[in-house]
Image (cartoon, rainbow, N blue to C red):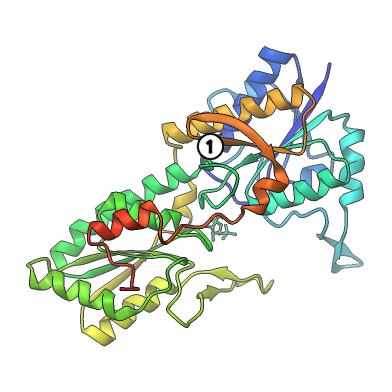
Amino acid sequence: MRRIGILTGGGDAPGLNAVIRSVVHTSSNEFNLEVLGLRNGFDGLVEPDMVHVLGRSDVRGILSHGGTILGAANRGNPFARKVIVNGREEIRDMSAQALHNIEHLKLDSLIVVGGDGTLRISKELCDRGAPIIGVPKTIDNDMGGTDQTFGFSTAMRTATEAIDKLHTTAESHHRVMVLELMGRDAGWIALSAGISGGADVILIPEIPFDLQPVIQRCRARAKHGSHFSIMAIAEGALPKGGHQKFKFPANGLQIPRLGGIAQQVADQIHEQANLESRCTVLGHLQRGGTPTPFDRWLATRYGAAAVRLAAAGKHGLMVNLRGRHIGAIPLDEALAETPKRVDPAGDLVTTARGLGIVFGDE
Ligand code: F6P
């Protein structure tokens, strides 16, 4: 019996369990392949005791569950792995161990579900002979080589619902509500949810902003009887001539994380325009919850396509979506187009501008 492995790397995203379920069912029903689940991203490849055979009972009932039954690790790079030696932390290249374990575990293929960081590691392992197939995942939707990653649809729904909820309280209190959304260096979540939720202002990293047009928009709305405004701001948005705002984790590892721009903008609007403003940071709520039907549909199709590639012995590829068609693209081509960012001259931004939404560059 041939055997494939699966791991989920990087930050979690709604739909990961749908991929795992699809891989297990397709492997057994279509190809009689055994599936090994590797726990906690690449950690499970470096430490093969974090591995177990996945059967039907393991994936029963998980289609609608967020998170991943395999666990994830977004700092688990085998090329730069943290190890403790004599009580001290060291960074070691454990890629040889990872490659050895693919053979040791008798994996004919390894399906890696991840975003750009995880898939870049996969590409490096492929270059050293690993039989990897990538599945693009991230709420940020910034993976190149595919129209959409799974996880994005659910994050967009959560963000849109938040905007809907902010509308009612904003209107009641005549306030400017500033909602900070995830997305790293891409503004897909803020832009898409901002359009769907009817935001008045959308600030994204691809269009550095000035506060004056934003204030003008809020004032103009008040003049026309709408004494409140809603702003969707991407965590990576930045002022013209300025920098992105980072917050650092309290654990002292000094790994920069984006965050804080919404509070800054809310404060400045209050100070400069005397408009009462409040900030909401939606944070990891965007990564959780029941995946939307679209994300389940996409994740399920990605999982099945990855198994078919594995069964055909095709590696070094990433499954992708083009229009309604599921196909595959070489990993390096997908990565060359990553991060995929919003086109400031594209249809989404043009549509938003046509609706009167302000981007702060007017
Ligand atoms: O890439 C997904 C994402 O949620 C980003 O939108 C965000 O910047 C980052 O991960 C948060 O990472 P962490 O879970 O490590 O705080």
Label 1 Cα crowd, 10 Å radius (few <14 / some 14-19 / many 20+): many
Ligand 1 is found in the corner quadrant, namely bottom right
The quarter of the rendered structure image containing the C terminus is bottom left
Please state the horizontal and vertical placement of residue 25, each as a whole percent of the image: 64, 19
Please state the horizontal and vertical placement of residue 109, each as a whole percent of the image: 79, 31
The quarter of the rendered structure image containing the N terminus is top right
Along the line of sight, the residue nearer the viewer: 8 or 239: 239
From the viewer's perspective, is residue 276 above or below residue 300? below
In this picture, residue 204 sits left or right of residue 90: left
At 66% from the left edge and 38% from the top edge, which residue is drawn? 329
At 76% from the left edge and 39% from the top edge, which residue is drawn? 316
At 32% from the left edge and 79% from the top edge, which residue is drawn? 211
Along the line of sight, the residue nearer the viewer: 7 or 207: 207
At 53% from the left edge and 68% from the top edge, which residue is drawn? 258
Q: Secondary structure at mark 1?
A: loop
Q: Is mark 1 within 8 Å of ligand 1?
A: no
In this picture, residue 124 sits left or right of residue 147: right
Report whether residue 73 is seen: no
Q: Residue furthest bottom?
A: 272
From the viewer's perspective, is residue 40 above or below residue 324? below
Q: Which residue is mark 1?
A: 15
From the viewer's perspective, is residue 213 above or below residue 167? below
Count the numbered circles shown.
1
Q: Residue furthest front?
A: 345
Give residue 41's quadrant in the image: top right
Amino acid type assigned to the residue bearing label 1 in the image: Gly
Report whether residue 168 is seen: yes
